[in-house]
Image: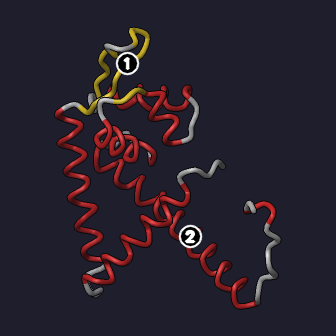
């Protein structure tokens, strides 16, 4: 029997309230995370927008990588990613090198300056998190990380 064949059971009032609470808290988290990412982008370079920080983090994690793979990971179009990468390239934060497996494609990597600026911004971000969570026991901080990872894994295959 597949998931589609299983009839959903009626939702209790308590379950509905719990899911509404999750939705509300996620909305707050996402709004604040966007503002936080914009701030982090500006710490990397004053001319960066809110999405640039995430691009740099992903390029660092997966370099060398193709821009098409980055666009697919972030679920944005190639034109969008090209515009964003152009800015990072012009600011000297990334470099593009020919892909030896495909002469039409380029591989992305951080420049030494991009790496330095990203690490400085990350250190500032970690400091902010330490301040925010200072009163929490280490066990709670680890639990938060585990729960966020579980949620992120669930959302990997979801298309907007």
Which of 103/113 is in front? 103
Task: Give the residue drawn at x 25%, y 55%.
Answer: 122
Name of the residue lying farthest toward the bottom: 14
Query: Badge 2 is on which residue?
Result: 26
Task: Give the residue drawn at x 33%, y 38%.
Answer: 59
Residue 141, compared with residue 46, is above or below; it is below
Which corner quadrant of the image does residue 96 belong to?
top left
Query: Badge 1 is on which residue?
Result: 106
Which of 145/81 is in front? 145
Residue 145, compared with residue 116, is above or below; it is below
Q: Secondary structure at mark 1?
A: strand
Residue 65, compared with residue 148, is above or below; it is above
Quadrant location of the N terminus?
Answer: bottom right
Task: Give the residue drawn at x 49%, y 31%.
Answer: 81
Task: Give the residue drawn at x 17%, y 33%.
Answer: 112
Q: Secondary structure at mark 2?
A: helix
Q: CA distance from mark 1 to mark 2?
A: 36 Å
Q: Is residue 6 left or right of residue 32?
A: right
């Amino acid at each position: 029997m597949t998931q589609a064949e299983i009839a959903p059971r009626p939702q209790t009032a308590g379950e509905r309230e719990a899911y509404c609470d999750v939705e509300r808290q996620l909305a707050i988290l996402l709004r604040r995370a966007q503002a936080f990412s914009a701030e982090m982008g500006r710490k990397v370079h004053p001319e960066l927008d809110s999405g640039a920080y995430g691009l740099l983090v992903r390029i660092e994690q997966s370099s060398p990588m193709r821009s098409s793979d980055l666009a697919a990971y972030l679920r944005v179009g190639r034109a969008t990613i090209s515009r964003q990468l152009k800015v990072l390239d012009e600011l000297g934060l990334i470099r593009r090198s020919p892909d030896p497996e495909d002469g039409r494609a380029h591989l992305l990597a951080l420049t030494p300056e991009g790496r330095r600026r990203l690490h400085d911004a990350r250190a500032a971000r970690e400091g902010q998190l330490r301040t925010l969570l200072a009163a929490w026991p280490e066990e709670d901080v680890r639990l938060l990380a585990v729960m966020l990872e579980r949620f992120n894994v669930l959302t990997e295959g979801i298309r907007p």
